[in-house]
Image (cartoon, rainbow, N blue to C red):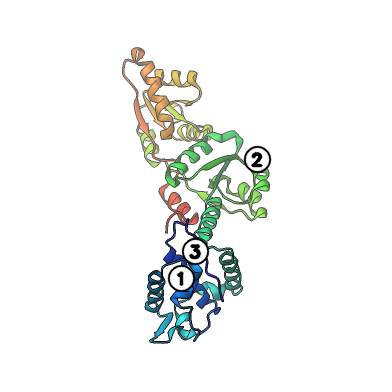
Amino acid sequence: MIKFHIQPDSEIPASTQLYDQLWFAIASRQFPPGYRLPSTRQLAMQTGLHRNTISKVYRQLEDAGVVEAHPGSGIYVRAQSTVESARPRLGLWDQFPKARDVVEDSLDELLRQGCSLNQARELFLAEIDWRLRCSAQVLVTVPKQDLGAGELMVRELESALHIPVQLIPLEELDGVLSQTRSGTVVTSRYFLTEAEAVAAPKSVRVIPIDIYDYGRELELLKQLPRETCLGMVSLSSGILRAAEVIAYSLRGDEVLVMTAQTEDAYKLNALVHSAHTIVVFDQASMPSVKQAIAAARDDLIRPPQIVVCDNYIGDKSISLLKRELGLES
């Protein structure tokens, strides 16, 4: 006779523990079709539960179509086809034909150790959630010469995804992936080829993201009066170099361009004192610009006009990344 074990200190109600164990005994054919279940008196002696509790469990099994009561005789397991019809029909069983055996064997072992079905489900789900979190680990990679762009990406991704994001220089990516192959590499399309060359041999996926197109700022640049001093501020040296080249190609010497990274207090202070218009290429730099303007307020005849760009990473790329990481349907 199968031994049923009730854990009195469990958060799971005793009746639920017994229900789960009886259901498993039937579904696994330890109680085959037509088998007469133990009487309420027998189960009461074995489990320590009140006979009324056991009767309630039997009624729940009967309502589920798993057992049937024969008046004056007892409780019997119904035809196996009825029990099997309650089993979930998953297309994945056909896709992975050996998966059922693996799942059933693992579940059998947990139940033999006294684990209830609900507890087993919690254990499986906890492990699955943990592995999903590991696979959702995001590694942002950019060349060392422009870690500022990577820092921008990290800040915006952490804010949008609500998961930790790690910045890895492209030159160090191979070593990091050699130690842990779980995760997803994210980079700008400009560095996609280099990142894939490192990640692909290790079976790590790389997702490219599209950055803000700066169309509004380009129109502003075209319309600036001659001899305007244009200041440009960003965490990224790469963004500033590209912006400076574009500004010169569009306006030549008509506009004086000054650039500063937020970490360079001297250049930022000089820019604030000289620029008529300041384009702040990332919102993370805005506090430093405001602080510099406030410190120079007594020296400024007229505060510069401030233009703050939208997020560095486009909304479409954020949505794509969420789907790829399983963070949204």
Crowdedness near tag 3: few (<14), some (14–19) or many (≥20) residues, C-alpha within 10 Å: many
Q: Mark 2: which amino acid? A: Glu
User: Is label 1 in a helix, a strand or a loop?
Assistant: helix
Quarter location, residue 56:
bottom left
Q: Which residue is mark 2?
A: 172
Q: Mark 3: which amino acid? A: Ile
Q: Which mark is residue 44?
A: 1
Q: Tell me residue 30's x, y (percent).
A: 56, 78
290 horizontally vs 263: left or right: left
Crowdedness near tag 2: few (<14), some (14–19) or many (≥20) residues, C-alpha within 10 Å: some
Question: For the residues marked 3 and 2, what is the alpha-carbon distance in whole angstroms?
Answer: 53 Å
Q: Is residue 25 above or below residue 262?
A: below
Q: Tell me residue 144's x, y (percent).
A: 61, 35
Quadrant in which the N terminus appears: bottom right
Which residue sits at x=43%, y=30%? 285
Which comes sooner in the sequence, label 1 or label 3? 3
Q: Mark 1: which amino acid? A: Ala
Q: Tell me residue 181's x, y (percent).
A: 63, 51
User: Is label 3 in a helix, a strand or a loop?
Assistant: loop
Question: For the residues marked 2 and 1, what is the alpha-carbon distance in whole angstroms?
Answer: 64 Å
Q: Which mark is residue 6?
A: 3
271 horizontally vs 203: left or right: left
Nearer to the camera, 164 or 197: 164
Q: Taking the image as drawn, is residue 34 in sight? A: yes
